Amino acid sequence: MTEFFIQHGGIIIALLGGALSCLLPGMGSAKAVGLVGEAGAGVVTEDPSKFSKILILQLLPATQGIYGLLTVFILLSRIGILGSNAAPDLRLGMLYFAACLPIALVGYFSAVAQGKAAVAGVGIVAKRPDQQAKAIMFAAMVETYAIFALLVSVLAISSIK
Amino acid sequence: MAKLNMLKIRVCALRNDRKRVIERMQRLGVVEIEPAKKLSEGVWQEDMSGERDGFQSTLSALQSAVSVLDYYAPAKDSMFSSYMGRKEINGREFEEMQQKGERTLSSCYEITRKKKQIEQLAADKLRLQLRVDSLAPWLGLDVKMRIKGTKSTKAFVGVLPNIYTEEQLILKAAEKHPDLTEFEIEVIGETSDSTCIFAVAANTQADSMDSFLRSLGITRPFEMSKKTPRECSKELRVRIEKCDREIADLEDEIREMAELRGIFKWQIDYYTMRLEKYEAIEKIAHTKNTFIIDGWIPEGEFPRLQTQLEERGAFVETLTIGKKENVPVAVKNGPITEGGEPILEMYAMPTKRDIDPTPVMAIFYYLLFGLMLSDAAYGLMLVLACGFVLLKFKPEGSNKKNMKLFMFSGATAVVWGVLFGSFFGDLPNVIAHTFFGVPQDVLILKPLWFDPIIEPTQMLIFSLALGVIHIFAGMILGLITNLKNKNYTAMFADNIAWMMVVGGLIVYGVDFILDMFGMGGLVVIPPDIKNVAIIAAGVGAVTVLLFSGLPTKSFGKRILKGAYSLYGITSYLSDILSYSRVLALGLATGVISQVFNMIGTMFGGGAAGAIMLLIVGLLGHALNIGISLIGCYVHTCRLQYVEFFGRFYEGGGRPFSPFSVKSKSFKFKEEK
């Protein structure tokens, strides 16, 4: 058992990290995009011409899921599941796992928070469609933190030696 | 900086010339009419609500006629039709259209009436269909439904709740009414929860039959006709067919009127124009024989307006603008930078003391958007699509400006894509490797500069450096704003002092920061310059501390205020870090396109592989372009609004909205 762990533990733990960084932001984005969709559907019932404006708001919290995906793909090629790199040893695997944590956690929570801001933005678009830009900005503010987390994760994964 | 200088004007003329003067003013479309206020005795505003209501109702009739036509005979519009410019017509065509329009106005009422008839017929048809459906279980009955019986028998036709077979009914009858002997019960048909029956009993036993059926809860059928159900159903079907025919005829009649759509659209424009005119008339002041219009006009347009209105018997003068007056704001920019105007309008128009930031903002917008997209192929597609729309459809107003925005942003994306070696991601390399057996380490497409996916830290540093330049541009615009407003203390204490602090600290610390990212030695700052830089930063900080609290008189309070604004250094730090999103979005676009390329080539080379790559590539890259464009748009806006405008721009001016011909489909050619 111990031998198995020493031999394969690295890639298992690294992949676990990768899975988390796809799972959590994906879940967060799905939840958030769904929330905005529900709110948006109500507005579109009243005024179908607002569809495209709402769609932009709905897509805003979708990016965390993409950031998670991005991290995983970079990780997969680093740990040799995709491409031809060698599998990591236990130490490297744990490092990769740690590197995945920022985007995994911040991705989830920022997606949900951004979704809520976007839902509130749907209210702006419903009442004052000319103020859509402000609604977008409120939601986009939240994304900064997902971007920081993504950067830390990606920079760490691509620099771990 | 192209904020237009506004003049306040007053136009006076005789009432007899009102139509000519106001119509000319509307055609010129350069004056914003200020509603008359504080009227003295003998001056009044006219109530035009009667006329306006008339135009409104004509307009809504025309609009519903067009929507009916669009439903039954959709116009063959291309997907770009909403970007299409208006059709130009000259004075003679205008007259023709007006005459034609008057003749065809009644047709729009006819179309809406026909539409109503169709709706009525459709409702009738539905009702008939329901009756046919309710007859379906009765089709087995071959006598008329209202049959009373024969000389010696009595007949019962009805519906029993629940499902019964004939045997069950006979047994029940025997059980409950043993006296009932001379009778017949037939199940004609059944629905999901009821049974349709026909029963006959001898006259003598009719009463007990009646009470037996009542005990089962018999009800009369929905349809009681004097004919057999089969005949009845047939007759109803004939009526349904008749409805269908009538509907089809009416629809054909509507389709035949489809050619009127153009005239209707013209009339919508025409009546909108007249409505606007009467709304304008309501705003202006009248006396018994004259009228007075107060309004705003961009300075450059004034001579043209003056000559044209004075030719028509009006007197035009300029007024001095009071200090508290809310002057409307209009901006005008060159053919390249006007793409930034929609972005500015979304935020806020400049106020009296702001300068127009569009030219500088637009250039940074194009650069940052392109850097986030950073793919030569995506950029090229954007340039071609927007260029095509611009040339082919000649859009106007904000449509045109938005197209320019994306076209120029796409153009910089092409440049960045070449520098970073990205054309649909790494598609050329992938194709060379999969289909032409080029070894994986030989690259067909090499970045001219570096590959951000392989060297993200270098890209991060570049993004942040660009951010520093952007923020400094903002500070310089702030300096110009303060200079223009003769606000010299703010210019020194806010703009120059902060430039010294931020600039000094960056020069002092840049090699240290680079070293932190493992790129030490990229920039070497001589110690002398470092010393100068840190001294400059110190002087700047002291200036902020001492003077940014002005005009507060008390020294203590002023220092506290200064200390607080010195704390604003954190906002510079976070603003610069915020530009790391440029790297993140660039990576997102790049990595995802590589992923799709990889999935596309999983099936290997050969014809099948090529087809798979084509399918996956088309779908994947279309998706990636869509997501990336929204991301780039939103985040470039954010960098402009928060990081850039935050340094100097106040915003909140009232946009200039001139009294003009706000037509949708036609443009009136201006006779000189």
Image: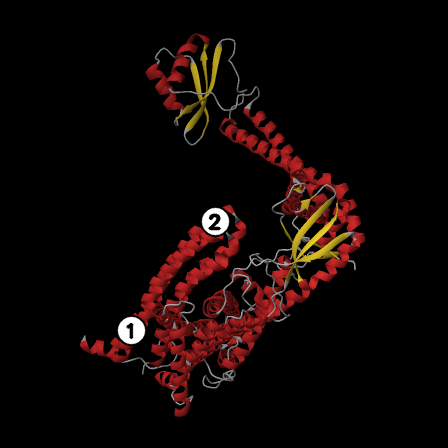
Chain of the residue that carries numbered disc 1 in the rendered image: A
Where is mark 1, residue-wise?
A97
Q: In which quarter of the image is residue B229?
A: top right
**Which residue occupies the foreground of this view, B311 or A134?**
B311
Where residue B135 appears, as percent x and y from the top left, is 52, 28
Crowding near pointer 1: few (<14 within 10 Å), some, many (20+)? many
Where residue B5 appears, as percent x and y from the top left, is 63, 64
In this figure, what is the number of numbered marks? 2
Where is mark 2, residue-wise?
A43
**Which residue occupies the foreground of this view, B442 or B337?**
B337
Name the residue located 30 percent from the left edge and 80 percent from the top edge.
A88
Residue B466 in the figure: left or right of residue A9: right
Chain of the residue that carries numbered disc 2 in the rendered image: A
Where residue B43 appears, as percent x and y from the top left, is 67, 43
What residue type is disc 1 on? Phe
Depicted B274 relative to depicted B474: above or below: above
Quarter of the image containing the N terminus of chain B? bottom right
**Which residue occupies the foreground of this view, B480 or B372?**
B480
Quarter of the image containing the C terminus of chain B? bottom right
Q: Which residue lies furthest to the top in this view?
A: B204
Depicted B497 relative to depicted B192: above or below: below
Q: Which residue lies furthest to the right in this view?
A: B92
In the rendered image, residues at marks 2 and 1 fall on the same chain: yes
Nearer the N terminus, badge 2 or badge 1?
2
Marks 2 and 1 sit apart, C-alpha to C-alpha, by 42 Å
What residue type is disc 2 on? Val
